[in-house]
Image: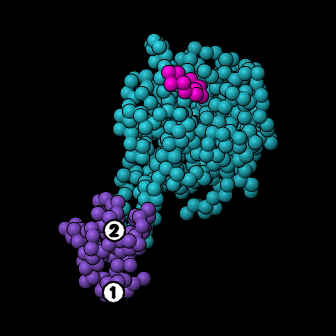
Chain colours: A cyan, B purple
Amino acid sequence: MIRSTQDDHRIVITGVGLTAPNGDSLADYRAALLAGKSGVDRYHIRYVGDTLAGQCHFDELKYQKRKEVRRGTRAGSIGIFCANETIANSGIDWPNVDRSRVGVYVGVTEHGNVETENEINEIKAFDYDTKVWSHHHNPRTVANNPAGEITLNLGITGPHYTVGAACAAGNAGLIQGAQMLELNECDLAIAGGVSESIHTFGIFAGFASQGALAEHADPACASRPFDRDRNGIVVSEGGCLFTLERFSDASRRGAKIYGELVGHAMTSDASDFVLPNPEQQSRCMHLALQRAGLNPEDIDIVSTHATATTSGDIQECAALRRVFGNADNVMINNTKSFIGHAMGAAGSLELTGNLPSFDDRVCHHTINVDNLDPECELSGLVLGEPRTKKSVDIILNNSFGMLGINSVVIIKRV
Amino acid sequence: MTNEQIREEVLDILEVIAPDEDLSQLDDAVNFRDQLELDSMDFLDIVMELRKRHRIQIPEDDYVNLASMSSTVEFLEPLLKDVEKV
């Protein structure tokens, strides 16, 4: 077979490994989304007390020994589970893969808060004597920890690092992996995002102080993007890592291709620490479309970032109106209504839940919208139940974060 | 603590830091590293646990005394003889 230069620069997704609050495989996760099954549950964390969160239920010991779990971090365990699952899912002949040509690029919203809080809690019992501060603290809290634990577990000797990108991190990890393949830094990329954030009380307390932490008597109804009765974010843990390859390599080995990354963009608001900026969000979507050589009406599904904060939801809808206007082809959904906000994993998990649409042509819906906020009214919103399209060829996935970081990826059916 | 109680204490610590190991067949005379998968971070864990549980400081130069169960018990005997087993 003659390798075409073009095919060497086409980046495709050939494997998916995930853990979400409502599923630990793509099949289970997708089934939960189509069935309207929430993953949000009651949760207790020190100092904050009783609250709500999306917790994952994967078996940490499937790919790690007890000692490795004890020594590492929750983010590391999530990453290891997702990395092993994506490799298995890709069908690649892993024992014969050159591990020095594998890169690991993991998006994180934050890392180190959990481990630092744990140590402070530990030394509190010793009157804050730092002599009992763990020697494990530094390897647990270095920013590359979640990616580094994956390389240790899988014997990968190519590059690894995390991409700190607030809640745009899941998309940012995917984009980084694709770019490193294009730069020939690796031949196989494990890329996406993870989050252990439900294990830091600080994130709950911070959102609560901001008036942005969700409360609801029924946990399944707590995450309500676009709904007038929303009252904030449900924090979740999770992870989703893709196997990325050049199209030429994937097609040569006859791999199942979940989709091709045909466009991506990242931009900054440069306007506020927390408030989103619809002008920059829409610019980010336009830039990704332009790079993909697509028009807004070419998009079949938009997976929104909306987190169920009033400002964030309304601003994203304003940005979507700017880009898509009255384009009647596009269907718009939101995955956080099911799983809460998986922070660093949100972008990759939310994209992944939509990938099966290429095959089944079904756009999963948004749950918990009982009273649509008029300011979130969009003609393509899929609410209440899934909707079927004649065909689904292109998905656009939004992920935005604090400090004004915007990311958009566009995936095309191959 | 008696030497037997010190041994139980060390075993208890090993169960925490090496949860995958079968400690029932541990040979007290043989170095831990020759029969268990322990690295330098694990030995620091032993030191840290003794510090937390009994407030004893073990200087780095004395870490060599923690090589086997026998040498560990022998080393800890004077440090823990007046300490009650919890």
Q: Amino acid at mark 1?
A: Thr
| Image position, residue A203 (x, y; %) | 54, 51
The magenta stretch spans residue A253: yes
Q: Nearer the viewer, mark 2 or mark 1?
A: 1
Q: Is residue A122 above or below residue A238?
A: below
- Residue of label 2: B46
Q: Quadrant of the C terminus of chain A?
A: top right
- Residue of label 1: B2
The magenta stretch spans residue A14: no
Using residue A84 as the reference point, say whether residue A58 is left or right of it: right
Q: Amino acid at mark 2?
A: Ile
Q: Is residue A70 above or below residue A233?
A: below
The residue marked by circle 2 belongs to what chain?
Answer: B
Label 1 crowd bin: few (<14), some (14–19), many (20+), radius 10 Å: some
Q: Looking at this view, is A219 or B73 the one in front?
A: B73
Residue under the point 35% across and 38% down: A157
Q: Decide which of tag 2 and tag 1 comes sooner along the chain.
A: 1
Residue under the point 43% across and 59% down: A67
